[in-house]
Image (cartoon, helix red, strand yellow):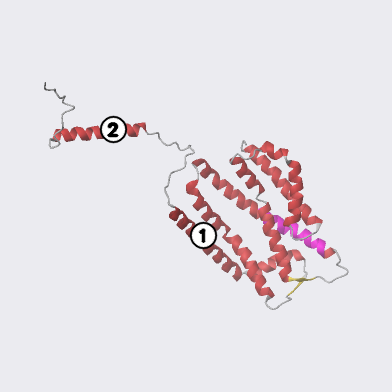
Amino acid sequence: MLETVSEAEQPQDFSDGKAIDRINESAIAITDNQIVDDPIADEDSDVVEDVEMSLFDHLEELRSRIFYALIAIFAGIVLCFTFVNKIVALLEIPAQGVKFLQLAPGEYFFVSIKVAGYSGLLVASPAILYQIVRFILPGLTRKEKRAIAPIVFGSSILFILGIVFAYELLIPAALNFFISYGGDVVEQFWSIDRYFEFVLLLLFSTGLAFQIPVIQALLAMTGIVNSSRMLAGWRYVVLGAVILGAVLTPSTDPMTQSLLAGAVGLLYFGGIFLVKAMGK
């Protein structure tokens, strides 16, 4: 018995133009259905934009970012070295006219390099932050990308405030203590190397200590802690602020340690207020 084959089951003659048109129309319809069924990416979604990069591409990107950051640091150091005498004179102001001695050949030269290095790093810090942000930005969600700009801006402002706080309050308080203590017994002649080691370390350690609210905000954004847990541990924070003030200050006078410990405590409670305002 001969079985009849339906028209749909019969082999198509692709030499026929109508058959080819029907195939094209079917492909277009399938594509349209897929496009309609695909969800439209919401701008507020937290999905990370997929950018396929191999390990070699990541390493190459990291190498280029480090290279540009090093160029910025080198340029900042060279720039600051050309004005190093003015920077040194500015940092000597809190010493209140104390005489500085060069106790070894070339001591001031190496001090100049040290001052230019710290100052150049400070000048190049915006470029360094830019390279860091450019490297981590592709891996962030849209929500994290919107938050990165306020975090970087707030971190920069707090670091500058920390340096100003150390220059205007901490360093003069520490130097006043050392000058007044035994001032009628010994003459105040200081090693210029030891003085700038003390000043530069105190400036940058205070700037880093002022990053506490930024760290609190990051911890709250990741869900590790919230404002209630931060407030519950205030006793440990007070103890930690005293210890941190003793560790970060290169001097042993109680005035400098108390000022830095008080600033750390205020920054911590200010960070709790910030986290509370974020709804965490």
Q: Quadrant of residue 255?
A: bottom right
Magenta stretch, residue numbers: 161-178
Query: In the structure shown, which secondary structural element does the residue marked by tag 1 occupy?
Result: helix
Tell me, yes or no, if residue 215 can be seen here.
yes
11 lies left or right of 158 = left
For badge 2, the amino acid type reads Ile
Dividing the picture into quadrants, the one containing residue 106 is: bottom right
Across and down, in percent, residue 203 comes to 69, 59
Amino acid type, callout 1: Ile
Residue at 48 percent of width and 59 percent of height: 63
Q: CA distance from mark 2 to mark 1?
A: 48 Å
**Which sits in the foreground, 10 or 88?**
10
Outermost residue toward the left in this view: 2
Q: What is the total number of numbered labels drawn onto the structure image?
A: 2
Residue beneath label 2, please?
30
Left/right of residue 10 with respect to residue 115 in the rendered view: left
The quarter of the rendered structure image containing the C terminus is top right
Residue at the extreme front of the image, as rendered: 1
Examine the structure image and report whether residue 171 is included in the region drawn in magenta: yes
Q: Main secondary structure of the magenta part?
A: helix
Q: Is residue 48 above or below residue 69?
A: above
Quarter of the figure that contains the N terminus = top left
| Residue 69, percent from left and from top | 53, 60
Residue 260 shows up from this direction? no
Per the image, the residue denoted by label 1 is 66
Which badge, 2 or 1, comes first in the chain's sequence?
Answer: 2
Out of 54 and 155, give the one closest to the viewer. Answer: 54
Density class for disc 2 (Cα within 10 Å; few <14, some 14-19, many ≥20) is few
